Amino acid sequence: MSRTIDYTPLLGAVTGPEIRAFRTAARSRGSNWGAFSVAQLVSGALIGAVVALVLVSSLFSLAGILIDSALGGGDLVTVVAPLAVLLVLGGSVAVILRSLFGNRRWERLMRMDRFAAANGLVFSPRDAAPAYPGAIFTRGRAREARDHFRSAAGRFLDFGNFHYVTGSGKNQQRHAWGFLALKLDRNLPHMVLDARANNGIFGSTLPGSLAKDQVLSLEGDFDRHFTLYCPRAYERDALYVFTPDLMALLIDEAAAFDIEIVDDWFFLYSPRVFPLADPATYQRLLRIVDTVGAKTLAQSDGYVDDRFASGGYVNDRFAAGTPAFVVAPQGRRLRTRFPGVAILVVAVFVVLWGWSVVSGLLN
């Protein structure tokens, strides 16, 4: 899967008229180009309201100081200080408005759209809830793929950033991930490579928590970079896919990312969004596709789940009438567990609550 990438659209000079013409044409394509997301509109409104409140308060303060100074009760410092604050706030408002509605945003979108067209991709700034079976795509609500690129032809590839919301009220949280999705030729057992390089204080950054008895240790120093999860009794199947040469590619090219193989999909996740205006991002992601992705495809090309094969459903190649799942039910999804950190928090809460009740009774 070697390819030549044209980075000129990301780096070449553009003019104001080009950006304005692109903005007009892009908005005519659909609402995902011309509109802002609800989160962007709400955050913009909140920022505007706060800044407006501060500006009005500062104006009233400045007016009082000027009046007081005119009557002989002030000095130069008390006049200049609030005026400087107003100038700073005014400049901040200008920067925010320019970022949200000015040419800079549209220039970035235009460059990415031109990059996509030059490299056999299709760019979209925002699409709701992509129907992928991966771990991050089924969480929360308000799920959106943003600034993402899909293949225009051939094998399906999609990469960009993904956002979703969990909780509500004061406990509401917004989550943002970088992702890459590559379509495989065959369904495989559900397997997860949890990268140690991006783990947090409490361990994995991946949503959900997988049962530890599904961890499979691999040879060499692979375990120093990844924790591999595969369904119980599917250890041989995992070794069929994760050969030493594929493991070496994973360490060299993708050690900073989590990998999930589920059904006939290969997913790569980053707990931080991808800076998609940076040519180095595309270079790295497309290199992973051309190395790790290509090797995964080659290594899984002949895979058959013997549990199904023995039942007469499939042979050594896909056949007409093959059922949608060619992996037995016990291999299709990893088992999850209640996270240990949550158990510890609940236990501490119960102990503290019990102590407070006992103390109240004793007193």
Image (spheres, helix red, strand yellow):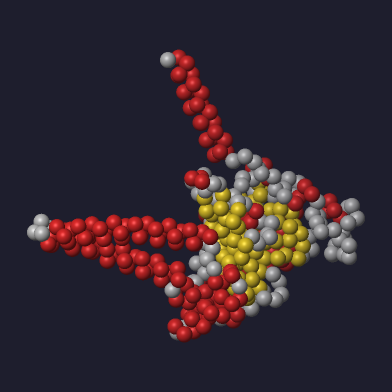
* Quadrant occupied by the C terminus: top left
Does 74 sit left or right of 169 as displayed?
left
- Residue 23 is situated, as x and y percent measured from the top left of the image, at 52, 78
Total residue callouts? 0
* Quadrant occupied by the N terminus: bottom right
Q: Quadrant of residue 188?
A: bottom right
Does 314 sit left or right of 108 as displayed?
right
Q: Quadrant of residue 340?
A: top right
Q: Residue furthest top?
A: 362
- Residue 212 is situated, as x and y percent measured from the top left of the image, at 64, 42
- Residue 186 is situated, as x and y percent measured from the top left of the image, at 77, 62
Residue at 53%, 60% in the rendered image: 38
Does 83 sit left or right of 109 as displayed?
left
Residue 220 in sight from this viewpoint: no
Q: Residue furthest left?
A: 72
Of 341 and 97, the residue lying toward us: 97
Q: In the picture shown, does residue 229 fall above or below 297?
A: above
Residue at 40%, 66% in the rendered image: 96
- Residue 358 is situated, as x and y percent measured from the top left of the image, at 48, 19
Residue at 49%, 81% in the rendered image: 20
Of 147 and 186, the residue lying toward us: 147
Q: In the picture shown, does residue 355 fall above or below 218?
A: above
Of 58 and 34, the residue lying toward us: 58
Residue at 27%, 66% in the rendered image: 87
Residue 274 in sight from this viewpoint: yes
